[in-house]
């Protein structure tokens, strides 16, 4: 079963390493330029997932949530732009970030809290829903989009 099929059914991970490995598996098949919309509450594994993407593309620097800087740019075999939209007040603020000016193909734009951006998130984005199960596993489900 492909990684997209597995994610559509939902995948549970029991550790940060397993979440990172899942992200690395997805990183291997992402289109040349991709947007990921990562939805879910605080602490459900979104940043850990982004760390797995980064490691898959040879990015060795620390990957932390860019809550206060809004986004960070990491360069490896692909450019990774990690955005945390939690602090944005209105969707219109996204345009003022000028992220498009920094995009260099091939890139991946990973957005935490995409619901804060409204229509700014591309229709082609892979939308992943993150949650925590009652037994404290992280659950990741591809809810729509195929890139």
Image: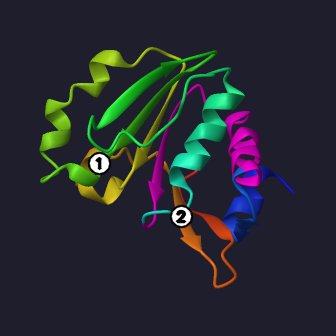
Is residue 147 visible in the rendered structure shown here?
no
Query: With respect to residue 66, does 37 lie above or below?
Result: below
**Left of 3 or right of it: where is 145?**
left
| Residue sitting nearer the eye, 118 or 69 | 69
Magenta stretch: give its range.
Answer: 17-41
**Left of 29 or right of it: where is 47?**
left
**Left of 81 or right of it: where is 89?**
left
Identify which residue is drawn at 59% across, 74% down.
132
- Image location (x, y in percent) of residue 51: 60, 38
Where does label 1 land, which residue?
85
Identify which residue is drawn at 65% across, 67% down.
138
- Image location (x, y in percent) of residue 106: 54, 19
| Residue sitting nearer the eye, 138 or 118 | 138
Q: Which part of the image, by quadrant, shows the C terminus?
A: top right
Q: Find the residue positioned furthest to the front.
A: 62
- Image location (x, y in percent) of residue 92: 12, 45
Residue 33 lies within the magenta run: yes
Identify which residue is drawn at 75% across, 49% down.
17
Where does label 2 land, which residue?
44
Separation (CA) of disc 2 from disc 1? 16 Å
Query: With respect to residue 11, does 34 lie above or below?
Result: above
**Left of 57 or right of it: where is 64?**
left
């Amino acid at each position: 079963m492909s990684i997209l099929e597995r994610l559509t059914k939902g995948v549970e991970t029991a550790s940060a390493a397993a979440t990172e490995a899942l992200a690395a598996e997805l990183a291997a098949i992402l289109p040349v330029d991709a947007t990921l919309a990562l939805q879910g509450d605080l602490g459900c594994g979104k940043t850990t997932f982004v760390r797995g993407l980064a490691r898959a593309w040879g990015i060795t620097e620390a990957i932390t949530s860019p809550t206060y800087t809004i986004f960070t740019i990491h360069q490896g075999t692909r450019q990774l732009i990690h955005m945390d939209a939690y602090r944005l007040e209105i969707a219109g603020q996204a345009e003022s970030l000028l992220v498009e000016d920094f995009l260099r193909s091939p890139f991946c734009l990973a957005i935490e809290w995409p619901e804060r951006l409204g229509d700014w998130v591309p229709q082609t984005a892979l939308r992943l829903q993150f949650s925590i199960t009652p037994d404290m596993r992280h659950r990741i489900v591809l809810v729509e989009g195929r890139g």
